[in-house]
C-alpha cells in the first residue's frame, strides 16, 4: 500500500470528488459508513457514546457516523464544538442531525461515557492547540472512556513527531482513513495511536497510481510464497552459510540456522568456534558445522563455493581477530549476504561502513544503527538518515523496532505491518537474519527476501503472541510459528 503526505491525501480526495465524480458530502457519507462498520464490529449498542465533532472534515465524518449509529440503536450524544465556524460539509450533516433525536452540545463533555469518538481535529492541523480546545482534549484524556480517534488523534499532525508541548488525544483505537498516516508509524507517537485500523473508502485508483511516493505499508496480499516443485531436491532450495556464535552466545547460531531451515532452505552450514560444536549439533542436528581454529571465537572466515546466501553476525562477538576477519570477508564476498548484530558492531568499531558490499542487507536495531551512522534526534530524522545511507552505500537497511522500516538502494521505504511487543526478546533478531538468508538461498530477490522476511518474522511473532501472550514469547517460539505463518500466506494466494 502506497503511503502519502497529508497534502497528497487532500489532493487525492479532491481528484476523487472531481473524477469519480462524487460530491464532498457523499464522500463523507462513504467514510462514515466504513467507520461505522468497523465500530459496530468492535462495540455493541449497550455502550453510551459521546462524539466530539470539530469544524472541519474530521467533524463532518464524526457527525455522519453519529447518524448511522443512532439508527442502529446506540445511545449517542454529539458535541459540536465551534459549530458557527464549521465548513459547509459539517454544517450539512449538523442540519441533518438536528432532525434526529440526538442531543447536541457545544461545550465540554459534561458526564462520563463508555466511549468517546474523537473527531475534533484531523491531519490538516497546523496550529498549537490552546484555550477551550486544549481543555476539551484534556477532559477527553482524563475520562475513563474508551477513546476512538477518527483518522488521527486530535492534536497530532499527520507527517511529524509529536511536540511534547502539544496537547494530544491519547486514543485507544485510531481508525485511520484509507492510508496509515506517516505520523502513525513513528515510535514516539505510538502512545497516542493505540491500536491502528485502516478504514478503506475507495479513493480514486488513478489518483493513487499517479501520485508519487517513496513510502509503502506492507500488507498480507503483497507477500508471495514460492510453491515447491514436486520433483525438487534439497539442492533446489539453496545452501545458507551462517557465520555465528562465540563462547556464551552459541544460542544465536542455533536460532539463526534453525530459522533458515524452517523457512525452507535446503542446506545450512554454520561456521562456529570449537566450543560450540557439541551445542550446535545437539540442538540442531540438521545443520552442518564448519569449525574455526579458535576455541571461543571466530578468527577467520572462508570463501566457499556452492553457497547460495550468507548470514553473518549473530552472537559472533567483537574480538579484534573477529573484527578483522569480518572486514576481510565482506571486502571479498560477492554472494547475497545478511549482516546482523555483532558483525555490524565490528564494522562500526573498525569505522568500515564503506566496506559493506553493495546490495548487502543489514539488520540493525537503533543502537547498532547509531554506531554505524551516527545519533539522530528522533525517529523521523533517523528515517531520513536511513534513506540517505541506503542510497549512498547501495544497500538494504532493516531498522528493527515498532513498525520496522526497510529502505532500499533506490530510496524506497517500506513499513512493516506485522509484529508485536512480545518480539522484543533475546534472539528475535537472530531469527530474522536466518529467515532472510533462507529466503535468499531459495532464490528470492534481495528486495523480496528483505520485505517478505520481515513480514513473515512479524507474522510468526503474532501467532506466537496470540497463543502464548506477548509477555511469554521467546525467539524459539517465533521459529515454532513460522510454519503457521507460511501456511496462512499460501492459503491466501
Image (cartoon, rainbow, N blue to C red):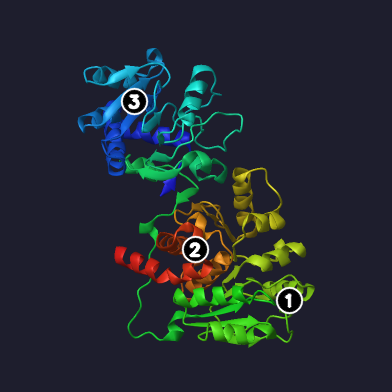
Residue of label 2: 473
| For residue 158, above or below residue 432 | above
Residue of label 3: 60
Q: Give me the residue at 63% from left, 48% from top.
A: 382
Q: Give me the residue at 40% from left, 20% from top.
A: 110
Mark 3 or 2 closer to N-term?
3
Q: Which label number is shown at residue 195?
A: none
Q: Is residue 382 visible?
A: yes
Residue of label 1: 325
Which secondary structure, mark 2? Answer: loop
Mark 2 or 1 closer to N-term?
1
Q: Position of residue 460 (x, y in %)?
A: 44, 64
Look at the image and tell me in which quarter the C terminus lies: bottom left
Which secondary structure, mark 1? Answer: helix
Residue farthest along the top direction in this orientation: 84
Q: Is residue 225 visible?
A: no
Q: Position of residue 289 (x, y in %)?
A: 60, 86
- Please rate how many residues cluster around mark 1, counting C-alpha atoms within 10 Å: few if below 14, some from 14 to 19, many from 20: some
Q: Position of residue 376 (x, y in %)?
A: 68, 46
Question: In the drawing, does residue 119 fall left or right of residue 243?
Answer: left
Q: Position of residue 22 (x, y in %)?
A: 26, 31
Q: Give me the residue at 43% from left, 40% from top.
A: 172
Amino acid at each position: 500500500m502506497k503511503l502519502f503526505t497529508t497534502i497528497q491525501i487532500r489532493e487525492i480526495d479532491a481528484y476523487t470528488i472531481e473524477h469519480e465524480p462524487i460530491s464532498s458530502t457523499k464522500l463523507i457519507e462513504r467514510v462514515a459508513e466504513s467507520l461505522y462498520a468497523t465500530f459496530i464490529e468492535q462495540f455493541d449498542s449497550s455502550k453510551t457514546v459521546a462524539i466530539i465533532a470539530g469544524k472541519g472534515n474530521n467533524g463532518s465524518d464524526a457527525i455522519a457516523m453519529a447518524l448511522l449509529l443512532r439508527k442502529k440503536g446506540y445511545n449517542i450524544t454529539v458535541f459540536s464544538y465551534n459549530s458557527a465556524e464549521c465548513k459547509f460539509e459539517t454544517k450539512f450533516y449538523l442540519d441533518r442531525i438536528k432532525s434526529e433525536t440526538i442531543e447536541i452540545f457545544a461545550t465540554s463533555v459534561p458526564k462520563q461515557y463508555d466511549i468517546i469518538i474523537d473527531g475534533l481535529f484531523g491531519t490538516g492541523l497546523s496550529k498549537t492547540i490552546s484555550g477551550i480546545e486544549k481543555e476539551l482534549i484534556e477532559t477527553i484524556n482524563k475520562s475513563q472512556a474508551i477513546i476512538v480517534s477518527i483518522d488521527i488523534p486530535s492534536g497530532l499532525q499527520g507527517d511529524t513527531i509529536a511536540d511534547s508541548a502539544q496537547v494530544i488525544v491519547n486514543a485507544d483505537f485510531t481508525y485511520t482513513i484509507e492510508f496509515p498516516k506517516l505520523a502513525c508509524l513513528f515510535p514516539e507517537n505510538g502512545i497516542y495511536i493505540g491500536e491502528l485500523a485502516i478504514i478503506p473508502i475507495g479513493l480514486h485508483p488513478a489518483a493513487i497510481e499517479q501520485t508519487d511516493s517513496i513510502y509503502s505499508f506492507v500488507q498480507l496480499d503483497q507477500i508471495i510464497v514460492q510453491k515447491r516443485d514436486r520433483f525438487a531436491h534439497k539442492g533446489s532450495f539453496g545452501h545458507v552459510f551462517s557465520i555465528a556464535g562465540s563462547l556464551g552466545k552459541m544460542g544465536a547460531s542455533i536460532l539463526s540456522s534453525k530459522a533458515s531451515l524452517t523457512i525452507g532452505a535446503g542446506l545450512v552450514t554454520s561456521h562456529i568456534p570449537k566450543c560450540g560444536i557439541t551445542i550446535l549439533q545437539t540442538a540442531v542436528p540438521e545443520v552442518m558445522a564448519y569449525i574455526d581454529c579458535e576455541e571461543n571465537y571466530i578468527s577467520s572466515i572462508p570463501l566457499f563455493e556452492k553457497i547460495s546466501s550468507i548470514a553473518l553476525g549473530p552472537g559472533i562477538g567483537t574480538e579484534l581477530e573477529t573484527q578483522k576477519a569480518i572486514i576481510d570477508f565482506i571486502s571479498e564476498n560477492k554472494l547475497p549476504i545478511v549482516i546482523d548484530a555483532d558483525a555490524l558492531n565490528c564494522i562500526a568499531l573498525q569505522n568500515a561502513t564503506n566496506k559493506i558490499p553493495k546490495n548487502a542487507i543489514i539488520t540493525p536495531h537503533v543502537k547498532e544503527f547509531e554506531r554505524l551512522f551516527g545519533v539522530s534526534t528522533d525517529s523521523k530524522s533517523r528515517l531520513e538518515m536511513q534513506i540517505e545511507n541506503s542510497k549512498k552505500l547501495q544497500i538494504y537497511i532493516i531498522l528493527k523496532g515498532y513498525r520496522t522500516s526497510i529502505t532500499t538502494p533506490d530510496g524506497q521505504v517500506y513499513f512493516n505491518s506485522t509484529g508485536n511487543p512480545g518480539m522484543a526478546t533475546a534472539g528475535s533478531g537472530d531469527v530474522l537474519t536466518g529467515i532472510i538468508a533462507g529466503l535468499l538461498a531459495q532464490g528470492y530477490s534481495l528486495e523480496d527476501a528483505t520485505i517478505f522476511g520481515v513480514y513473515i518474522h512479524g507474522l510468526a511473532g503474532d501467532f506466537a503472541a496470540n497463543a502464548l501472550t506477548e509477555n511469554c514469547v521467546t525467539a524459539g517460539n517465533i521459529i515454532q510459528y513460522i510454519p503457521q505463518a507460511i501456511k496462512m500466506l499460501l492459503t491466501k494466494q
